Image (spheres, rainbow, N blue to C red):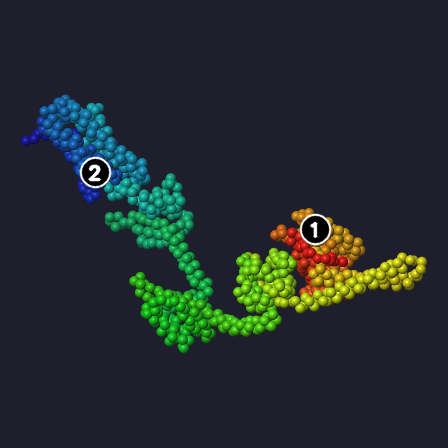
């Protein structure tokens, strides 16, 4: 029979036994996972350790107390081991808990147990023991003196396991928020209390010998663990698991209690709503935290009032969220809070909006398309029709969608033909649709439109034809235009035939010169004009030069270049040499053809024989020249005699003087007319000599302007002169002939500008910097538009000019143009009646052409 005595040591230990037993019972219900299981075994060994201590404290026999102390070591050894296992599981480091590591961890505990139960042979656990002189009831507690293994191995190993487990909890504690950090705080305190008590007990600082306060501290540890389990839901929600799941989840999560206070909020929610990281939302009223969002406040109120679960899309801070509200219930099915989950769908919303915009844009493209876009199913029912289709048909969209296109929009006489083609199409009998199909559409108002269709198949995922997609072009006007074009083509053909007959009868040849390739194309009449057969001319411009008279070739080439550089028409007369050395005069007209960049690339013109006209003109010119020479001699004599008589003042009276002056003036006019006729005959008989030399062009212009200054001052005409700085100092020109050109133009401008008018003279280079342009512009009477084409012809004077000045001959501008043309220049004008006239004289920068003749102009 075992002798025992219950004492106050036993009572103290019994409290720890009861508390740890309750802890074992509570943790038993929560051992479904690794964390709960490891905590259960920790609680179990705490209970075992407390129970053995309580029994040992009541036993009186020393030998039995020693035996119970040996069994007591089982709890002392495995409590640190299971605490470490629990800390690894709790802190989600359970991947370290494998068979190999567990075996390694158990090596020291099993060796220690063996040494404990064999201590009598080696004394490594305790070297000796003795009964305390302090009696507790009938029991004398045993006091042990510990051995080397206890101090250097067992105690060191156990403390290492406890400190390592505590370190893992401390590390986790720094990452957690309230209230989950309280759980870890309780675990740490629950571990530190027995640890500190054990240190005090082992070191011998405790004044009650044999009373192990480590077991007593288990009471406090058990109480703390029970509080953590029931109050902070310890083992129901592991804080690190929350850190890995809730803290890291992309959705925002907020948990509120029944009082609408926030008891949990994760980082995603803080980020979504621009709440600072250190903003303490926990414990605050949810409605106050989100007072900036009226829509969310309404949802909060609805969820609080009606206690229902629901989902809703909401906009907060210009972000879009899918909000899910869940009611939370305890184990008794009583509501204790709500869960708000916010999923950021801003990007998805943006994509949806973009897709919506793209669909709308696609619809706009369909609507702005200039063709009909029509989708039909296999039965011919309308699936889609764009705006153009509605315009042509005259129907509204809802009147066509789902309705049979052929029955509504086709004339009865067209329905059978078109429907037959459509059925073959959707049945797959027509494999390829290479050509368009045309048919008439009957609008709602009864109008008919001809439409050309291009179609493709609509197929399902398996490739089966389920309909057609067609684009239709309204070709009603196009077809009418084609008929008009055909009719016009027939008319044009007839006109071209008549033109060919006309050119052949008039002996007019047509040619086409490519300015880039220098290819020259002739019609049949051109070959006849040049006395050639097809094959005798190779179609090259250089070959044409061989037919042109050597004395005319240089001039004609310059005239062509001048027309190209100035963008004007080509107009020339030249001689051609026939194969039999006979000579003919050819009149040539041509227009330039310009490309998209407004650069000339082709010259198209005509040639016709003017040999007979030249011979007639030559005969006329010779007659005029002969008559003029014959007239000059008596006119010169009359001029001398009248001047001699006018100088003899003593022998004539006033009436005689008046008669003589009138005779002298009329004679001078006749001399001028005769000189002009002689100049014309010399030009037309090709006897004119042009002898260019280096002259100062600016000085020539200024001399002519100064010569006319007196008459301009008498008419109070304002004269403006502008000479460009880049005009060359020397210019190759026949000074006398160029002076006649400038003087005639300036003189005309003065004569036909009213008193008080203005004249502007300018000398510039053109844009290419290759040509000189002399310009005289006035604000005078101008030239009537109907008579401008004749202004350079012989003996022509405009009607308004004849009224203003009756003394003109009509030969001046003809002579001016002849000089300019023969010397390689160009002259033209711009004029508006009663507004003024501007004359332009254009010369290449190289100067005037040299012509070897035997007579100069008078």
Q: Which of label 1 and label 2 is nearer to you? A: 1
Q: Nearer the viewer, residue 508 or 616?
A: 616
The residue shown at (75%, 64%) is: 625
Q: Inspect this view and state whether residue 439 appears.
A: yes
Give the left or right position of residue 709, taking residue 126 as reference: right
Q: Please, which residue is most extreme toward the right here?
A: 650
Q: Which residue is mark 2?
A: 97
At mark 1, the secondary structure is strand
Q: Residue at x 22, y 26 (%)?
A: 200
> Would you identify the image quadrant in which residue 365 lies?
bottom left
Question: Could you tell me which quadrant the C terminus lies in?
Answer: bottom right
Q: Residue furthest bottom?
A: 413
Horizontal relation, residue 490 to residue 100: left or right: right
For label 2, the SS is loop
Residue 656 at x, y percent in the picture: 91, 63
As drawn, the residue found furthest toward the front would be 580
Q: Is residue 402 visible?
A: no
Residue at x 15%, y 24% (from the top left corner):
147
Label 1 – label 2 distance at C-alpha: 116 Å
Q: Is residue 812 left or right of residue 481?
A: right
Q: Which mark is residue 693?
A: 1
In-front residue for pair 711/286: 711
């Amino acid at each position: 029979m075992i002798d025992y005595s219950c004492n106050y040591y036993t009572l103290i230990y019994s409290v720890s036994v009861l508390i740890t037993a309750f802890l074992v019972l509570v943790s038993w219900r929560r051992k479904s996972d690794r964390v709960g299981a490891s905590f259960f075994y920790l609680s179990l060994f705490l209970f075992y350790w407390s129970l053995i201590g309580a029994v040992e404290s009541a036993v009186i026999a020393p030998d039995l107390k020693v035996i119970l102390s040996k069994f007591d070591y089982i709890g002392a050894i495995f409590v640190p081991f299971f605490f470490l296992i629990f800390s690894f599981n709790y802190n989600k480091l359970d991947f370290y808990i494998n068979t190999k590591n567990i075996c390694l961890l158990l090596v020291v505990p099993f060796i220690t147990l063996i040494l404990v139960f064999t201590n009598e042979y080696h004394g490594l656990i305790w070297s000796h023991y003795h009964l305390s002189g302090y009696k507790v009831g009938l029991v004398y507690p045993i006091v042990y003196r510990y051995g080397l293994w206890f101090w250097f191995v067992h105690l060191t190993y156990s403390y290492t396991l406890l400190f390592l487990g505590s370190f893992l909890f401390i590390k986790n504690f720094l990452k957690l928020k309230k209230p989950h950090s309280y759980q870890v705080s309780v675990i740490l305190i629950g571990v530190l209390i027995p640890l500190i008590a054990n240190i005090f007990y082992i070191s011998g600082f405790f004044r009650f010998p044999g009373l192990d306060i480590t077991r007593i501290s288990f009471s406090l540890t058990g109480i703390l663990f029970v509080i953590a389990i029931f109050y902070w839901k310890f083992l129901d929600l592991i804080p690190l698991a929350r850190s890995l799941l809730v803290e890291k989840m992309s959705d925002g999560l907020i948990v509120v209690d029944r009082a609408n206070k926030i008891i949990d909020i994760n980082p995603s929610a803080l980020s979504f709503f621009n709440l600072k990281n250190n903003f303490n939302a926990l414990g605050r009223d949810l409605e106050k935290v989100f007072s900036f969002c009226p829509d969310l406040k309404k949802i909060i109120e609805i969820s609080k009032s009606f206690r229902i679960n629901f989902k809703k899309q909401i906009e907060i801070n210009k972000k879009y969220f899918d909000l899910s509200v869940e009611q939370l219930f305890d184990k008794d099915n009583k509501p204790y809070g709500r869960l708000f989950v916010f999923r950021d769908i801003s990007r998805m919303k943006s994509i949806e909006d973009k897709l919506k915009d793209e669909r709308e844009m696609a619809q706009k493209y369909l609507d702005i398309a200039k063709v009909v876009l029509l989708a039909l199913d296999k039965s011919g029912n309308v699936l889609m029709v764009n705006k153009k289709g509605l315009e042509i048909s005259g129907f509204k969209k809802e009147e066509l969608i789902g309705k049979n296109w052929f029955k509504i929009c086709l004339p009865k006489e067209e329905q059978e033909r078109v429907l037959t083609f459509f059925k073959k199409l959707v049945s797959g009998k027509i494999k390829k649709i290479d050509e368009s199909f045309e048919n008439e559409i009957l609008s709602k108002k009864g109008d008919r439109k001809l439409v050309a269709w291009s179609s493709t198949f609509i197929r399902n995922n398996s490739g089966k034809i389920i309909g057609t997609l067609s684009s239709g072009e309204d070709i009603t006007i196009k077809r009418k235009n084609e008929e008009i074009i055909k009719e016009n083509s027939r008319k044009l053909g007839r006109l071209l035939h008549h033109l060919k007959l006309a050119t052949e009868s008039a002996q007019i040849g047509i040619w086409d010169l490519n300015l880039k390739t220098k290819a020259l194309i002739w019609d049949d009449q051109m070959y006849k004009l040049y006395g050639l057969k097809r094959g005798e001319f190779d179609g090259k411009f250089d070959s044409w030069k061989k037919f042109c008279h050597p004395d005319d070739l240089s001039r004609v080439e310059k005239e062509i270049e001048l027309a190209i550089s100035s963008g004007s028409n080509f107009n020339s007369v030249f001689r051609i040499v026939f194969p039999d050395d006979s000579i003919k005069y050819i009149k040539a007209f041509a227009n330039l053809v310009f490309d998209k960049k407004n650069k000339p690339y082709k010259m198209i013109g005509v040639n016709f024989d003017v040999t007979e006209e030249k011979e007639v003109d030559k005969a006329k010119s010779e007659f005029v020249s002969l008559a003029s020479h014959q007239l000059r001699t008596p006119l010169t004599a009359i001029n001398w005699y009248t001047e001699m008589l006018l100088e003899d003042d003593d022998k004539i009276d006033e009436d005689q003087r008046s008669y003589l002056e009138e005779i002298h003036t009329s004679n001078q006019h006749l001399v001028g007319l005769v000189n002009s006729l002689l100049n014309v005959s010399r030009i037309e008989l090709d006897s004119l000599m042009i002898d260019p030399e280096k002259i100062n062009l600016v000085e020539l212009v200024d001399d002519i302007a100064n010569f006319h200054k007196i008459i301009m001052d008498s008419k109070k005409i304002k004269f403006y002169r502008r000479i460009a700085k880049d005009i060359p100092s020397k210019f190759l020109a026949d000074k006398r002939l160029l002076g006649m050109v400038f003087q005639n133009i300036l003189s005309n401008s003065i004569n036909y500008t009213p008193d008080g008018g203005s004249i502007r003279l300018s000398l510039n280079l053109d844009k290419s910097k290759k040509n000189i342009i002399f310009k005289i512009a006035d604000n005078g009477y101008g030239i009537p538009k109907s008579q401008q084409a004749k202004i350079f012809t012989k003996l022509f004077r405009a009607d308004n000019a004849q009224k203003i000045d009756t003394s003109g001959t009509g030969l001046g501008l003809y002579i001016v143009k002849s000089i300019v043309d023969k010397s390689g220049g160009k002259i033209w004008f711009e004029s508006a009646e009663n507004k003024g006239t501007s004359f332009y004289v254009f010369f290449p920068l190289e100067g005037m052409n040299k012509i070897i003749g035997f007579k100069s102009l008078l």
